[in-house]
Image: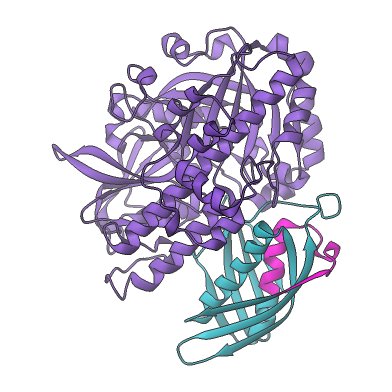
Amino acid sequence: MAIPEDIRKISDTVWEIPPTHKPGMRVPARIYATEKLLREMDEGVFDQVTNVATLPGILKYAYCMPDGHWGYGFPIGGVAAMDARTGVISPGGIGFDINCGMRLVLTNLTYEEVKPHLRELVDKLFQRVPAGVGSTGFVRISHDEFRQVVEQGARWCIKNGYGWPEDLERTEEGGCIAGADASKISQKAVERGYKQIGTLGSGNHYLEIQVAKPENVFDRRLAEAFGITLPNQVVIMFHCGSRGFGHQVATDYLQIFLKVMETKYGIKILDRELACAPFHSPEGQDYFAAMKCGINMSFANRQVILHRIREVFSDVFHKDPADLGLHQVYDVAHNTAKLEKHVVDGEVRDVLVHRKGATRAFGPGMEGLPDIYRETGQPVIIGGSMETGSYLLAGIPSGDQTFYTTAHGSGRTMSRRKARKQFQGKKLQKEMEARGIYVRSVSYSGLAEEAGPAYKNIDDVIEATELAGISKRVVRFVPIGNIKG
Amino acid sequence: MPYRYLDDIATADVAFEAWGQTLEELFIAAADATMNVMVEDLTTIIPREHRTIRAEADAIDMLLFEFLQELIYYKDAERLLLRVSRVHIDRRDDHALLAAEASGEELDPQKHELLVDVKAVTLHRFQVERTADGWRAMVILDI
């Protein structure tokens, strides 16, 4: 129904819409998906990815990942690499939830050891990691201190006792992206965010206890390098972002860009949510510095949540967190624009890669990876639906075809409203418990919206990324405990 | 209710359509539609705290955008759930001014059945238009 007639099959997992599809397209659009996933995509994806192809300075293709679905501005799963000299920066290519991302934490415990304590663990995590509408965290700081947090990211947390120094090297950008400038953020953004460090938020944000079953380890060498060494090893995965702070930064600059885009820079766009400014303009650079504050707030948020997880596991098992092996595997961002060096037409160029609901997946040996992962390639953390499973992948050399970018999750196929009509939160909670997944949520209707069938099949999505050669499967995890925002 | 949610638009977010005979009625309806995404029963919000919302924009649709954004700001900054009782809009040639009276209370999960958080008002398909019998708006909220 929704698939454009002029789409062309490039391979079993790559589909191309030519620039003749829509006036103003500067490059073709490429959708990464199996035919099955392509057919499941909603009409918004095709319209939005071809809108992205009209943005000034876009290189090679406007991409959509296999988990792509209708978003605002860019599709979710949208990727666009802009030439840093001639291209634009767009908040709609990053999302309101700047640096929404995933963090994966190991334990040296097995499922058998955790099972008797599962309810207590989930109940305590539910108490100590606030979730839901307007939730606030335990870190009490002033507006001025919050301005330091957004410039320093997870480093601020480590300095203040919320984590271990090793956590930093296991976070993209070392947990603190350079160039964040708090003079570029509004007071409103500070007021929305300064009490929210250490909170999950709501929607599809969650914290999950998961198990790596032996049959779900696809690459033993990489799994071991990432710390998955025991049969039925328990891990913790969580998904959240920069909370009200990031949302306000994006809103502020969307309005600023709308005012100057056409009048000052002569840029015309097909959807106001794609408001943008030349990357090197004063407005573009201000947003870049403010957006980096959002990136750092998110790193700090996830760092404080990790600290709470260590406290809870330590309380429940009466052991030091270090003795429980609570090491972080990695922390990945999936809503960002980052300045990176990529080879384009045989030449190394500075490229601003927008990833909206898409994860960076650097291959082995690439600059930007910490020493511990230099040989393996980047760990890529993909959250599935709360009922099915999640993945740990690795970046590979052939990821250069998408500027080293892969999927970020399952991707929704059913709207929130439809899911609420089809599923009942309380019933779902009981059914999941019967299947060995203990769930706590602040909102039953919020829980119903996240039901497994509202999402694409995570295995199909991951298979598509592997077939396309943009990332490689390492381990699949199954959920046993979940906290839903 | 002078608003309805649209099921098949923007898969992971929430789209709604709101209407009113006057612009003022439309703005009040859109405010309730936004709050109703976060709170199941708006009648559980007791008007204990009062806030005056002011906004200014160069077009009527951007005035609605800024107005709704203010409600989201208060939800995070002061944890206030607000309902709007009165809106005054002053339209000039090249810009529009708004003053609105809002009242409500701090959110309390024991008392207010909370649903999902609204992150932002998006501009994707955002529209305010005059219709045969008044005004209509189309809004997609980021969840």
Toward the left, the furthest residue is: A346
In the rendered view, tell whether residue B69 sits above or below residue A76.
Answer: below
Chain with colour cyan in the figure: B
State the quadrant of the C terminus of chain A: top right
Residue B64 location (% of width, % of height):
58, 75
Tell me if B102 is positioned left or right of A287 in this view.
right
Q: Is residue A85 toward the left or the right of residue A209 in the image?
A: left
Which one of the lettered chains is coloured purple?
A
Q: Quadrant of residue A283?
A: bottom left
Q: Quadrant of residue B22?
A: bottom right
Residue B30 drawn in magenta: yes
At horizontal 46% and vertical 28% (from top left) the residue drawn is: A168
Queried whether the magenta region covers residue A418, the answer comes back as no
The picture places residue B54, in percent across and down from the top left corner, at 61, 78
Magenta-colored span: B29-51
Q: Residue at x 70, y 74 (%)?
A: B29
Query: As rendered, which of A39 and A478 lies closer to the eye?
Result: A478
Q: Can residue A252 be seen here?
A: yes
Residue drawn 49% across and 31% down? Answer: A331
Viewer-closest of A247 and A417:
A247
The percent coordinates of residue A169 (x first, y second) are 43, 26
**Which residue corresponds to the image point at 47% horizontal and 13% vertical from the top-left?**
A223
Q: Is residue A29 above or below residue B6?
A: above
Q: Tell me if residue A355 can be seen.
A: no
Horizontal and vertical percent for residue A252? 48, 63
